[in-house]
Structure formats: C-alpha cells, structure tokens
Amino acid sequence: MKMMINKIKKQGLRMTPQRMAILEFLEGNTSHPSAEEIYHQLKLKYPSLSLTTVYNNLELLTKAGELQEIIIRAEKRRFDPNPAPHGHFLCRICDSLFDLDAVTLKIRTPSKYNGYLVENFTIYYYGICPACLEGEANEKNTLQRQPKK
C-alpha cells in the first residue's frame, strides 16, 4: 500500500481521505467490485461520499495504472487492484468473477509481438466455475436417484 501511495503522490495526485478509503477497500480484494459496490461499502464509514467521487477516483486510479478496469459485461464495470495483465473468468451461473493467468499468450508488457508493440492486453473467459459445476453435478445425481412415477 505504501508503494502505491508514493507512486500516486509522484504523479502529482493528492491522497484524499476518499482515495485512501478506496485504495484500502481494494487492497487484496479479489471480488472485482463495481463502483456501486465500493460506494455502498464505504458510504457507511464516509457518509458524505458520493457515487460520483467513487467513479472519479476509480477512473483516476485506473489511468494512473494502479487499478485494472474490467468490462466483462457491458452493463457493469468492475475494478481489480491487480493492474498486471491477466485474464478474468465470468461464471454464467453465479456471476462471480475470477482471476486467471493468461498462460496461452506468454506475452509480457510492454513487448514486441509479431511487429506490434503490445502495451497491455485483456482476456475474458466465460463459462461455469468449479463450485457451480459441482452444484450442477449434485443436482443431476439427485434427479437421477429419484424414482420415476
């Protein structure tokens, strides 16, 4: 966190209480929250906080390279405190979002790839997470065991 604060200050940005609260909320957070989710969590502790302030700070922190914006669904932007390029998996059943290493590309950023200068990349995977797959399997087994009428 201290390195992130120093990096933000070096970019000429002030560390406001709201910005600090957003960074603290996101530190180590793997749920990839939306601006609305962050706002509702922080509003309890910071009653004067507005959704616009949250959006503005998330935008600023993303541009500063401290956050990764995830637009895996058009209707909901989410934010990841890990700005390093990596993939994300969206479960179509429970709507959970998980980090996945982009092992298939082996591209480091920035780097040259087939003549292109790759500065960043985003990979989205869609499907069913292990927990939901297990739940579907359990449901099928239960249905198969029921006697037919």
Image (cartoon, rainbow, N blue to C red):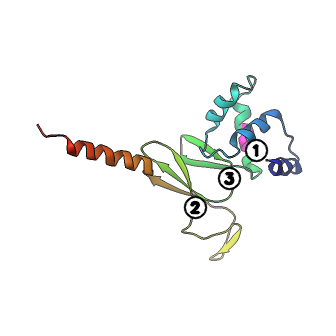
Viewer-nearest of discs 1 and 2: 2
Amino acid under disc 1: Leu
| Number of on-image labels | 3
Magenta segment main secondary structure: helix
Amino acid under disc 2: Asp
Q: Residues within 10 Å of mark 3 (few under 14, many from 20)?
A: some
Residue range of the region highlighted in magenta in the rendering: 56-60
User: Marks 1/2: CA distance?
Assistant: 25 Å
Q: Is residue 115 left or right of residue 91?
A: right
Inspect the magenta stretch and tell me whether residue 48 lies in it: no
Q: Is residue 27 above or below residue 113?
A: above
Name the image quarter holding residue 100. Answer: bottom right
Inspect the magenta stretch and tell me whether residue 59 lies in it: yes
Q: Earlier in the sequence, mark 2 or mark 3?
A: 3
Residue extending farthest left: 149
Q: Earlier in the sequence, mark 3 or mark 1?
A: 1
Amino acid under disc 3: Asn
Secondary structure of residue under mark 2: loop
Contact between marks 2 and 3 (CB within 8 A): the answer is: no
Q: Who's the residue at 76% across and 23% down the image?
A: 48
Taking depth in this image into account, of 50 and 87 the one nearest to the observer is 87
User: Marks 2/3: CA distance?
Assistant: 12 Å
Q: Earlier in the sequence, mark 1 or mark 2?
A: 1
Residue wearing tag 2: 101
Residue extending farthest bottom: 114
Residue wearing tag 3: 82
Q: Who's the residue at 68% across and 46% down the image?
A: 28
Q: Quadrant of the C terminus?
A: top left
Q: Position of residue 73 (x, y in %)?
A: 52, 45
Residue wearing tag 1: 60
Contact between marks 1 and 2 (CB within 8 A): the answer is: no
Q: Who's the residue at 56% across and 67% down the image?
A: 103
